[in-house]
Amino acid sequence: MEINIGKQNSHKIFFFKCPSCGLSYSTALPSFIKKELPKIVDINSKKLEGAFKRGNLKYYDSQGVEAIQFRKRIGKIESGTMICFGDKIEIIRGFPKIRRTLMLNPALKNHFADEVAVEEKMNGYNVRIALVNNKITAFTRGGYICPYTTKKAPEIMDLTDFFTDNPEIVICGEMVGTENPYVTHYYPEIGSLGFRIFDLREKVSNKPLTIDEKFETLERYGLPPVKLLGIFDVEDAPEKIMGIVKKLGEADREGVVMKDPGMKITPLKYTSSKAHADELEYAFSYPFEFGRSFFFSRVIREGFQAYELEESWEELEERAQRLGESILYPMLDMIKHVSGGEVASEDLVIHVDSYEDAAEFVRHLRDLGVVATLLEFDHGKAVIRRIHQSTSDRITNYLRGGLY
């Protein structure tokens, strides 16, 4: 079956559906990647063709959007970038990676010129919301369209006027709350589900609005920003930020993102000791689902933070105890859990309009490689069980005498 999905420089793109397996494909896609995509993203055609052959560029079809998905960074184009087809080709750039500093004092003075704007870094999942084919669509960090977020974001925020006036701007923010199906964290001011915006960026160029422009725009449309915790002279910033991060940690909050007020310098991030411990506690509950670099990086952060703070013996002892408990206790609990014949799993709760909405989100999780099942649905409340199969299998193997 032939479907004309778009037009670029008078070259029609035709996709086909295989009559035997039902999968969509396009004999024109390699030609598009070779001839047209280099003009759109300003990248050498051979580099793009190589990326396509390696699977780093993929054809994507979900939630009514057909696109080319950048699975990895290619040249200057970020991972998670989507080239979306429709009445016109829409470019939704991936969110740039934010580097982390381990030592605030030297890093800030080396990185920033005059002033540092400090915004709260919230514990949720990174979402880009854009107008694609005249529909408000939510993209996860990797470029996947999340059906749950696409439906919930316009319910949480009135986005109609914003996108009517700013169709070429992408909203970058964090979905947070206890009904966040990816990363659950309680914020008193948010409760079950909320959204906080940290950037506004141009679609094609990925150029961000300045700090002032962003906050003025969000205020104009009544949209919720992340907290601006202060703008400091670069000389005073390390001490000020360290105090802010300590207070955030005490309040069970994650940390900060430090930005140039003009957004001409790439941002940096810095997180609290409590956030490191919380992440380790979760990860060691399912220890065989995460790479070793995940664990190692968080322990390294603790070492450098303790050094820069010049902590007393009592403070170091408290940090060491917090770190050790976040590693040992959750892992031991899971070993006991699996030894009793149970499976390593966690239950996620979301509220949706229908059973089909819940089932659609489960299908989305499976597309991401997550083993999940819809456990229960009752009056809009959906309980989704996520199975951590690798942790279950490997713990069971070791308990039976398997070698590590």
Image (cartoon, rainbow, N blue to C red):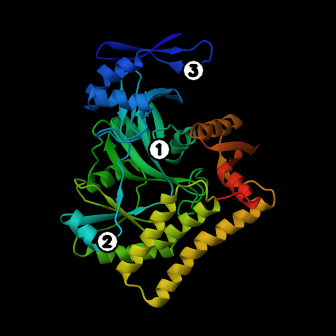
Q: Residue furthest left?
A: 113
Question: What amino acid type is highlighted by mark number 3?
Answer: Leu
User: Would you identify the image quadrant in which residue 234 lies?
Assistant: bottom left
Q: Position of residue 292 (x, y in %)?
A: 51, 59
User: Mark 2 highlights which residue?
Assistant: 104
Nearer to the camera, 385 or 187: 385
Q: Considering only order in the chain, which callout, 3 or 1, is on the residue closer to the N terminus?
A: 3
Quarter location, residue 365: top right
Residue at disc 1, secondary structure = loop
Query: What kind of residue is marked 1?
Result: Asp
Using the numbered discs, state the Cα–Cα distance from disc 2 to disc 3 in whole angstroms.
51 Å
Position above or below: 375 against 133: below
Classify the position of the C terminus by image quarter: bottom right
> Which residue has dot 1 on it?
158
* 14 sits left or right of 347 in the view: left
Q: Residue furthest bottom?
A: 313
- Crowd class of label 2 (few under 14; some 14 to 19; many from 20; radius 10 Å): many
Q: Which mark is on residue 23?
A: 3
User: Looking at this rendering, what residue extends furthest in the right direction?
Assistant: 340
Q: Could you tell me which secondary element the residue under label 2 belongs to?
A: helix
Number of numbered discs: 3
Instruction: Count residues near mark 3 (Cα–Cα under 10 Å), then give few for <14, some for 14-19, many for 20+.
Output: few
**Residue 341 on image: x %, y %:** 81, 56
Is residue 346 visible in the rendered image? The answer is no
Is residue 368 positioned above or below 109 on the image? Answer: above
**1 and 3 marks in contact (CB < 8 Å):** no
Secondary structure beneath label 3: loop
Neighbor class of circle 1 (other Cα within 10 Å; few <14, some 14-19, many 20+) is few
Structural distance between the alpha carbons of marks 1 and 3: 36 Å
- 289 or 159, which is in the foreground? 289
